[in-house]
Image: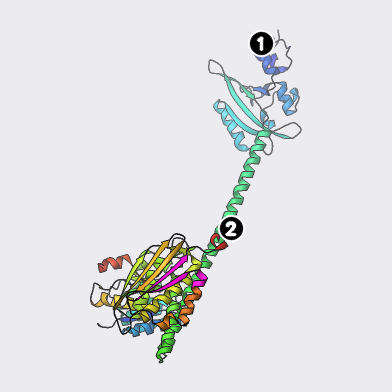
Amino acid sequence: MSEPLRVLIAEDEALILMQLEFLVEDAGHVVLGSAATAAEAIGIAREVRPDLVFVDLQLRGGSSGIDIVRALRDDAAMILVFVTANAQHLPEGFEGAAGVIAKPFTEAVIFDTLAYFSECVHAPPPRSPLPLGLRLAPAYRDALGV
Amino acid sequence: MERDDAWHLTGDLMVEHGKGDPFAAAIRATRMPMIVTDPRRDDNPIVFVNDAFLRLTGYERGEIMGRNCRFLQGPDTDPNAIQQLREAVGARRDISVDILNYRKDGTSFWNALYMSPVITKGGDLHYFFASQLDVTDRVDAQMRTQNEKEHFEREVAKRTRELSDALAAKTMLVHEVDHRVKNNLQMVASLLTMQTRSISDPTAREAMKSMLTRVEALGTVHKRLYQSHDVERFDVAEFARELATDLVRGSGRSEISLHLDLEPVEVPVEKAPPVALMMNELITNALKHAFPSNRPGRLSIRVQPDGRYFGIRIIDDGIGMPQEVVGTRSFGKRLIESLARQLNASIAWQPGDPGTSIDIRLPRESPGAKDST
């Protein structure tokens, strides 16, 4: 397998954060850090520059994952993916995020998503089929040419 | 010789002037209240009034002759209507207006007033002629209707607002509950994932993984619930696609190929969890037992409507179900049987050549009253 993805996770639910950390590591990737608020996540992301950021929508202290995506979306090197139980309320185009995974997700969807974006980063365009549980933003799909 | 204007000083039909003038006689005798005013004199006074007018207003002739008509107005007379009259007089044109007037005794009546100027050939304004009609009944009825209409509209608007508020509150509540259910299902899955990692005994670990796939199957059901066009229906075919794909991918068995033959089948939402769990058990079983030792193979899933029923067929080309899976009462097997009973489903397990074919046939609608809810 190619170079591991460097991943940041913005999730305020401790159990779900732990599960995501385990799944990322089980898939052979690296968790650079985690954040429970939008400000924290933006700060860490600017410092460590992850390849992939998992973004929950409702974060601690009433902060929103949408703010994370708005702050980081202009950095083309970072793939931003919402992981949320509110997927149906996201605006069309996902505010500039690459895609959305709806909660509750299955382990398989997280593994497939990591594999898919790993190909996007290291060997584009991806050869794997788009995971069923991952919805790509139209703009990101167009940019990939898939 | 009588005075020129003697004709308008009386209501007497036999008055000398105008005697034999059928028009003057008609105006005196008509039941339509009428007056004539003289704008050439100061303050446009009344110069003729017929008996019908006196009957309508309750005045004596002597009390109103020579006065301006404004004595008919009172506290509730619409200033707009008065202004319109004034403008018509000033502009020497005719006017028709409903105006609230007052009798001598102070009671009011709605007067459908028609007033028109009498202009000579030479263009001189000589008189204004006015006819009155008591239309109190009509105006009252109109106002009552208008009031009722406005009252009704206010009530409808109020009720609509209440319903909109209630709907907004209900929608918010549904979203909140939906969000919580999804998050809680995710947390249950998280706990199972993490506990599984800490278990070294392969059998126990396997059991934990089975539990995780069951919880994940229920999670997928819930995730899909509000995605269809109808919140009360659940598409079994699209669910089967997601479940089977997840299970095959989750098994890590890339040498097993998945074939889907799916036609849309919508069932009531209450059937979704048992259908999902049953499919989960059957597909998991096939993945676990049909292809041992990394044996490659093909798993196909078909969902098809069949009249008032629908069918789910799961076929593998593996080694065939081992006797201990078909015969014994494992937890998975009992789960399948219980769910089948709940769904009134029939299950046929048939040896394939090679492999196993499982046919499930189940009614699309729920029995009894639940249909109509």
The residue most toward the bottom is B200
Q: Which percent across, then down, holds residue B272?
A: 47, 69
Disc marking residue A93: none
The image quadrant of residue B196 is bottom left
Q: Which residues are magenta?
A: B340-366
Task: Pick whichever of labels 2 and 1 is earlier in the sequence.
Answer: 1
- Sort mark 2 into few (<14), some (14-19) or many (20+) by Cα contacts within 10 Å: few
Where is residue A97 drawn, in percent x and y?
A: 34, 70
Q: Would residue B296 be seen by someone viewing this image from the given angle?
A: yes
Residue type indicated by callout 1: Asp
In the rendered image, which quarter contains the N terminus of chain B?
Answer: top right
* Chain at tag 2: B
Q: Colour scheme in the image?
A: rainbow
Q: x and y percent of residue B6 in the render?
A: 70, 14
Q: Is residue A24 left or right of residue B91?
A: left
Estimate how packed mark 1 is, as few (under 14), some (14 to 19) or many (20 or more) residues with alpha carbons within 10 Å. few
Res A15 → quadrant: bottom left
The CA distance from mark 2 to mark 1 is 70 Å
Quadrant in the picture for the C terminus of chain B: bottom right
Label at residue B21: 1
Residue B162's mark?
A: 2
Whole-percent x and y of residue B187? 46, 80
As displayed, is residue B256 above or below residue B27? Answer: below
**Chain identifier of the residue bearing label 1 in the image:** B
In the depicted structure, whether residue B8 falls above or below residue A67: above
Q: Secondary structure at mark 1?
A: loop
Please say if the residues under marks 2 and 1 sit with CB atoms less than 8 Å apart.
no
Magenta run includes residue B364 = yes
Element at badge 2?
A: helix
Q: Which quadrant holds residue A77?
A: bottom left
Q: Amino acid at mark 2?
A: Glu
**Residue at image coords 39%, 78%:** B284
